[in-house]
Each structure stands twice: as structure tokens, then as C-alpha cells.
Amino acid sequence: MGWWQVNADTLAGSRFVLSPLAETFACLKVLHAGAAAHPGERTWLAARLPDYRRRLAADPVTAALVRAGLGPEWIADFLTPTPRGEDFDTEVARVRETSPEAARAHLAVALRGPLPAILQGRDDLPDRAADLLTYVWTEAVRPYWPRRRRVLEADVVARTAQLSQGGWAAALDAMRPGMRWLGENRLQVNLHEYPPREISGAELFFVPVTPQRHGWVSWEEPHRYAVVYPCSGALADTEPATASAPESLNRLLGTARAGVLALLDSPMSTSQLVAVTGQGLGSVGRHLKVLLDARLVRRRRSGRSVLYYRTAAGEVLVKAQGAAPPPAERS
């Protein structure tokens, strides 16, 4: 397994950041795989996949670059510069600035073997990679970025609340498959058999992306490391999230209000609920007031945000309604 040695100061100074390039690269991986993880992602993929495939069919060099860069176990490092919380243009410029020699070396590592003939000796691979990422950002991510950003922000709020309630071990164990806190200052980041890394004293970033099957680690030794992870499943769907409530609960409370209650297994603010459900601010506020009055949710302040979360009674109601069979129809 791959793990990092992390001292208390590094962990205490770590932070969540959003990265348009990380989101774009995760979407590139979805396009490359041609498979979606949930209905909202399926709708997006169906709209974008034909044009992506036409583009690569017309450009066999870039197509070979993508196949090589997304290796069976390792991603070519230059495609995923460590996020710093910058805008897309600044981030993708770092891909373009990679030396041709480094790009070819990274691709060979990802392939675990020599480059195919079509890529050997080429000095334009960083430019081609940056151009493809810019295309994916412009055509497939940027039109949805305001909503995706709100979804990612909601995930960060939920993770921060989880951190305050259960500590770093609980927050890290739930972040991505294969990742967990091992104790003795050791953070397991994946299940691959790689040598441990000493990162004490470095900057450590946690970076959410919306595609559900994709995450990775990156670093700029020895100063900066990042874990890119899929954000919470309920938050990642690009469609309104009220459908996650059991049908019986929808009938009891109404679809919109039941959807709000179903989402509050993790603390969320009003603005995050607006972003995830697609409901208006006034509607969400009214639903929260009814749920508060019924003592199905509570609220508490976290910094500048007011977070809402289910009470024990709310938990019982959601679970009971989810398990109950539908009522018999009357003749």
C-alpha cells in the first residue's frame, strides 16, 4: 500500500482547495472511459462523448497521448500538476510548460514500458495535452462550472463538519477508497505497493471533484502534496437531489421537503441545499422551518455558516420510511 508520513503540523495546516483543472482532468477520465457513475453524469456524458470521440479520431497523436497518460495503474504526472487553488488558465499553463523530455518520461512510467512509435521523439506533447484539457474545460466543464463549484463547496462544508465531529481519522477514512489513517502519523493514500513518502513540513491539499470513480494523488517534491478525491455521492449528481428520498417519505412530507431532509445526513447550509436541490432560496428556507418546528432537523453555527443536520427523530423517520413497504391501493 502507498502511505505518507505526516506530522501533526502538516496535518493541522492542510486545507481543502477547489481546482478547475482537477475537475477537468477527472471529466477527461470519464470521457476516456465512456462510462458514467450516476444518472446526472450519464446525461452529461451522452451530450459530450460524441464530439470528444470525433476530436480524437481526427487526431491520432493526441489519442495515443491520452491512452498512454491514463495508464493501468499510474497517471502521467505532468497531466495532473498539484492543485494550488488557482484558476484554470494558470493551472493549465503549468501543463504546457512541462519540458518535452519530462512529458515523454512521465508517459513511459504511466505505460510501464516504451512509448508507441507515434509518440516517440515528439516535442509537442505538453502543448497537445494542454490543448485537449482546454477543449474539455471549454466545452464540457466551464458551462456547468458555477453549479459544480457549489456542489464541491457543499462537500467541503460537509467534510469540515465531519472533521469537527470525528477528527482527522474519521474524515480521512471516508474520503476515498483505499485511503485511511493508519496511526503513528501515517496516512494511507492508496492500495498500490509504493514506497512510503515523508511529507512532514510540506503543504497538504485535499481536492474534491464531482466524477465519482476518479481520484489520484500528486506532488511537487518536497514542498506540496495533494489528494484528489470524489466528492460525496449525494452531492455529486448534477440533477436535483430530491430523488434520493424514499417514495413513502415523499408522500408523507412532499417531494421537495423530503429531499431536503434526506440530504441532511451530513450538515449543510441553506446555500448548499439550494445548489444541490435546484430549489429556490425561499423554498428551501420554508422547508427548513417546517423541519425545525417538527424537530426533525437542528442547526448550529460553523464560522460564518449556519449548518442544518438531521436529529435522531429525523434519522428514524428517514430510515423507517425507506424500509417500509408501500401502502396497499384501495379499490
Image: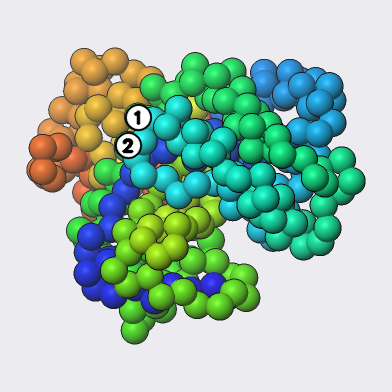
Left of 271 or right of it: where is 62? right
Q: Residue 308 versus residue 125: which sits nearer the camera?
A: 125
Kindly check if marks 1 and 2 are in contact, taking CB atoms under 8 A apart as contact. Answer: yes
Residue type at mark 2: give it. Glu
Residue at x 66%, y 44% (from the top left corner): 100
Residue at x 34%, y 25% (from the top left corner): 275
- In this picture, is 72 found above or below 64? below
Q: Which residue is mark 2?
A: 153
Question: In 3D space, how far apart are the residues under numbered discs 1 and 2 (Cα atoms)?
Answer: 5 Å
Work out which quarter of the rendered image holds the N terminus and state it: bottom right
Residue 254 point in image, percent of width and height: 36, 24
Please tell me in which quadrant of the rendered image residue 279 appears: top left
Work out which quarter of the rendered image holds the C terminus and state it: top right
Residue 12 point in image, percent of width and height: 22, 64
Please tell me in which quadrant of the rendered image residue 199 appears: bottom left
Q: Which residue is mark 1?
A: 150
Residue 212 point in image, percent of width and height: 55, 44
